[in-house]
Structure formats: structure tokens, C-alpha cells
């Protein structure tokens, strides 16, 4: 988590100030619940709420001696609250505070990521409709296939990120649980009603059964979701990088006034943002592996997961937040070149219409095998001798014996390939 790839709203979630504030809220809320049940004096809960505070430098100082962050925190809070602080943390264990806090931070991060996805979806929708009928060549294996539209490319990305938004909402829901169950999760020293009260006040659900820690399969699912979203970011970034190659140049990142592409070559306009997104996506995917490995803890708990989560919690969410924001900017500012798309389609001399000719021949009674042979032998002349496909077909007596010249020409109509664009858009965006 470095400033270059961070945004302040997300980084604030992981700052010590916010973490300790959440810890204090958990402790005070638990005390309120205990007081309401008559388990601790009401005055103790009131004192914690009124005078509860902490000093980060003091916490660090205490932790250097006691080597335990929660004890250091509670000691600092006690210095603010006074004698009544002895009732804080009654029956709780450190994981009750740490895990509940971590889940709150993850839900806060998820809310930002969902908003990021909404912004990206809006940009994709706008640009998709702008280029709904901008015809371009589709590619399979990197080779020209058949015509599509640039709007359909963007609509596909919209549908993908709409699914990602649903996944993020589900991941938030799954991780939004609370554990106030005490050592090894048996509630031996804390009433289950305390957990229920804390969960409701903090906008969480009680964990059905915790083993001193909240089960880490929930967190594995959360970080796996971030990894899937990052992979979708990279897919679009890779598409843009391919489209910006000099030999293709059908679209490119916006190049601002005064921007420089190379320290050595003044002519360069490089897809640096998309390349950056590719690298950031690799990082976010990498964080999913340790999250998956955190699921297997020893018995009721160990802390092998702790160091991992202290790093991947901030890093994964901050990095993905930055990446989604950057991708939104790339899509919004993307420069599209329809004329270059048309020129690239024309480079293969009409070969992109080969399937239509194949189907026309079979519909005219030619066997599929013979039709394929007829079309392919004329197509190879285009590849090898730079011929024009339509011209070669019209000069082939075996083809013209089956199809009138006008029928052959009809197979080269680009409009044939866009006739269902409206139907696809209705599926993606609604009527």
C-alpha cells in the first residue's frame, strides 16, 4: 500500500486511528449490552461511553513492553476511563475485538468498491451506447474473424462487471459477521445476547458458530472475489493494449496536453495506464492465495492468519479501489478510431465474409465439404497473393454455377452482422 496507487477514502479505513476507534466502539457496545443484562454496573458502561478514548503513541509504547496489541489498547483506554475500565472486555477474548473489527473494515471497503463498480458500469454503458453501431472486426486467436461492433465489446465488459458487482455484494454479505463469544467460542464467560446486541448495533450478523475466531472461509471468499474483479480489470486493460498497438490503433488511451510517452523517443504514445492496470491486477490476484491458505487454522485458533490479514486487508482493497477508479477514467477518456477499424477490416480483402459465402453455397445445395473447399481455395489466394476475395469468387466458375453474382455480392453486406445488436443491448441493459 503506497501513495502512488492509493486513494484517501480507502486508505483511511486501514489507518490506526480508524482501527482503534472501531475497537473502542466494540468494547463500549459490549459493555452496554452487559450492563443492560445486569452483568456489569450500569455506571461502568456509562463511564466507558463518556470517557472512552485512546492515544496511539501510548498504545505503541505499551505494546513495546507487553508485546500484545489488544492489551496495550485496553491499558490506554483504562487511562482515560478510570477505575470503571476494569469491567471492559469482561469475558471477551482478543479475537472477538480483532475479528469483528476486521469484518467491519472489510464491509466498509466493500461499500467503496461497490461504488467504484457503479461508476465503472456507468462509463461502460455510456461508451457502449455511443459506439453501439461502430463496426469493427472481431478476432479469435488474434486473427480477424467476423464483424462485430465496438459497442458490443463494451457491452460485454458491462455485463461482466455487473456480475462482479453482484459478487462484491455477496462477498460483503458473507463477511459481515460478528463474534463476541469468548475463549474457544463457547460463550462460557459472555452471554450470547451480548454478541447479538453488538452485532445489531454495528450492522453485522452474529457468527452462527465461532471457534474463538470467525471462520476464514468467509474471508477467503471475499479476497477471491477481489481477485475475480481484478482479472476482469486486466481483461479490459489487455484488450485496450492490443487495440492501441501501432499496427492496429483502433482505440487508444487519452494522451493529454504536455504528456510524454518516452524519455528517449518523443513520438511515443504508450498504453501506460492499461499496462499499470495489468500489473495491479496481478497483485490483487496474488492476495487471494494466502487468504485461501488462512482457512486451515490449528484447532480452535492460531494466529498464522494474523500477519497475512494485516497486510492483504489494506493492500488488496486499496489496490483494487485504485485500479477500478483508473479503469473508469481510461474508459471515459478512451479515444476510438472508427475509420481505422474500417481500414483494418478491409485489410484482408473481404475474407471476414467467408462464412456467409459458405452458408449461401450450402443453402444452394452444395455439400458442406465442397462448399468449404470452394471458399477456402479462393480465400487462400487472398492470403498468399493479396487478391480480393469478392473478385476471386465472382471469377470462380464452380462458385458462380451455384450462386448468382448478385447473391455473392449480398454476402458482403456489413449490416447483416449488426442486425441483432439491439436485441443484445436489450439483454444487457434492459429495454
Image (cartoon, rainbow, N blue to C red):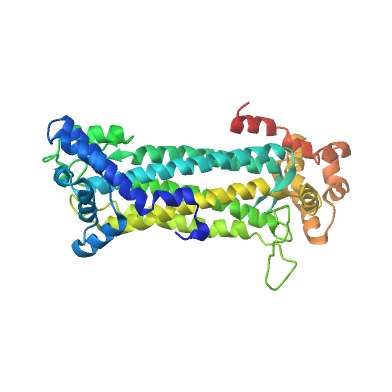
The residue nearer to you, when weighing 320 against 367, is 320
Is any part of residue 365 visible from this angle? no
Is any part of residue 346 visible from this angle? yes
Apparent side of residue 239 relative to residue 338 in the rendered image (left or right): left
How many numbered circles are shown? 0
Name the quadrant containing residue 81.
top left
- Residue at image position (82%, 44%) is 399
Apparent side of residue 429 relative to residue 87 in the rendered image (left or right): right
- Residue at image position (65%, 59%) is 271
The residue nearer to you, when weighing 95 against 149, is 95
The residue nearer to you, when weighing 74 against 68, is 74
Residue 111: % across, % down: 44, 40
Residue 68: % across, % down: 21, 58
The quarter of the rendered structure image containing the N terminus is bottom left
Check the image and report above or below for 69 versus 97. Answer: below
The quarter of the rendered structure image containing the C terminus is top right
Residue 264: % across, % down: 70, 73
- Residue at image position (15%, 35%) is 191
Name the quadrant containing residue 368.
top right
Q: Residue furthest bottom?
A: 264
- Residue at image position (60%, 55%) is 238
Residue 241: % across, % down: 64, 57
Check the image and report above or below for 389 versus 123. Answer: below
Q: Residue furthest top?
A: 431
Apparent side of residue 308 relative to residue 388 in the rendered image (left or right): left
Name the quadrant containing residue 178.
top left
Amino acid at each position: 500500500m503506497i501513495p502512488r496507487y492509493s486513494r484517501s477514502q480507502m486508505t483511511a479505513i486501514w489507518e490506526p486511528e480508524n482501527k482503534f476507534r472501531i475497537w473502542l466502539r466494540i468494547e463500549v457496545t459490549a459493555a452496554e449490552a452487559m450492563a443492560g443484562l445486569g452483568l456489569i454496573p450500569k455506571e461502568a458502561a456509562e463511564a466507558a461511553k463518556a470517557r472512552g478514548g485512546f492515544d496511539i503513541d501510548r498504545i505503541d509504547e505499551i505494546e513495546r513492553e507487553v508485546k500484545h496489541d489488544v492489551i496495550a489498547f485496553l491499558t490506554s483506554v483504562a487511562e482515560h476511563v478510570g477505575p470503571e475500565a476494569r469491567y471492559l472486555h469482561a469475558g471477551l477474548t482478543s479475537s472477538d475485538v480483532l475479528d469483528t473489527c476486521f469484518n467491519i473494515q472489510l464491509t466498509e471497503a466493500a461499500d467503496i468498491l461497490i461504488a467504484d463498480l457503479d461508476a465503472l458500469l456507468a462509463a461502460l454503458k455510456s461508451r457502449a451506447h455511443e459506439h453501439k453501431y461502430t463496426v469493427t472486426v472481431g478476432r479469435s486467436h488474434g486473427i480477424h474473424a467476423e464483424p462485430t461492433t465496438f459497442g458490443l465489446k463494451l457491452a460485454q465488459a458491462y455485463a461482466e462487471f455487473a456480475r462482479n458487482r453482484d459478487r462484491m455484494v455477496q462477498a460483503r454479505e458473507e463477511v459481515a459477521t460478528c463474534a463476541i463469544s469468548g475463549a474457544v467460542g463457547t460463550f462460557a464467560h459472555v452471554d450470547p445476547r451480548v454478541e447479538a446486541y453488538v452485532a445489531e448495533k454495528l450492522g453485522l450478523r452474529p457468527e452462527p458458530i465461532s471457534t474463538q475466531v470467525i471462520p476464514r472461509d468467509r474471508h477467503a471468499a471475499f479476497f477471491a472475489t477481489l481477485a475475480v474483479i481484478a482479472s476482469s480489470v486486466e481483461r479490459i486493460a489487455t484488450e485496450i493494449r492490443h487495440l492501441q498497438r501501432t499496427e492496429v490503433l483502433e482505440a487508444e488511451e487519452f494522451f493529454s496536453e504536455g504528456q510524454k510517452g518516452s524519455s528517449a523517443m518523443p513520438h511515443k504514445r504508450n498504453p501506460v495506464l492499461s499496462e499499470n492496470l495489468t500489473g495491479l491486477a496481478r497483485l490483487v490476484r496474488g492476495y487471494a492465495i494466502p487468504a485461501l491458505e488462512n482457512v486451515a487454522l490449528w484447532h480452535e485458533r492460531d494466529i498464522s492468519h494474523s500477519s497475512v490479514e494485516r497486510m492483504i486487508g489494506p493492500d488488496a482493497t486499496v489496490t483494487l479501489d485504485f485500479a477500478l477508479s483508473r479503469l473508469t477514467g481510461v474508459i471515459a477518456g478512451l479515444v476510438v478510431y472508427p475509420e481505422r477499424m474500417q481500414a483494418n477490416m478491409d485489410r484482408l480483402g473481404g475474407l471476414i465474409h467467408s462464412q456467409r459465402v459458405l452458408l449461401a453455397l450450402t443453402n444452394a445445395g452444395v455439400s458442406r465439404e465442397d462448399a468449404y473447399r470452394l471458399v477456402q481455395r479462393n480465400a487462400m489466394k487472398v492470403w498468399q497473393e493479396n487478391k480480393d476475395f469478392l473478385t476471386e469468387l465472382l471469377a470462380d466458375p464452380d462458385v458462380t454455377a451455384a450462386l448468382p453474382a448478385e447473391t455473392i455480392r449480398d454476402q458482403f453486406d456489413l449490416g447483416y452482422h449488426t442486425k441483432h445488436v439491439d436485441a443484445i443491448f436489450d439483454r444487457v441493459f434492459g429495454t
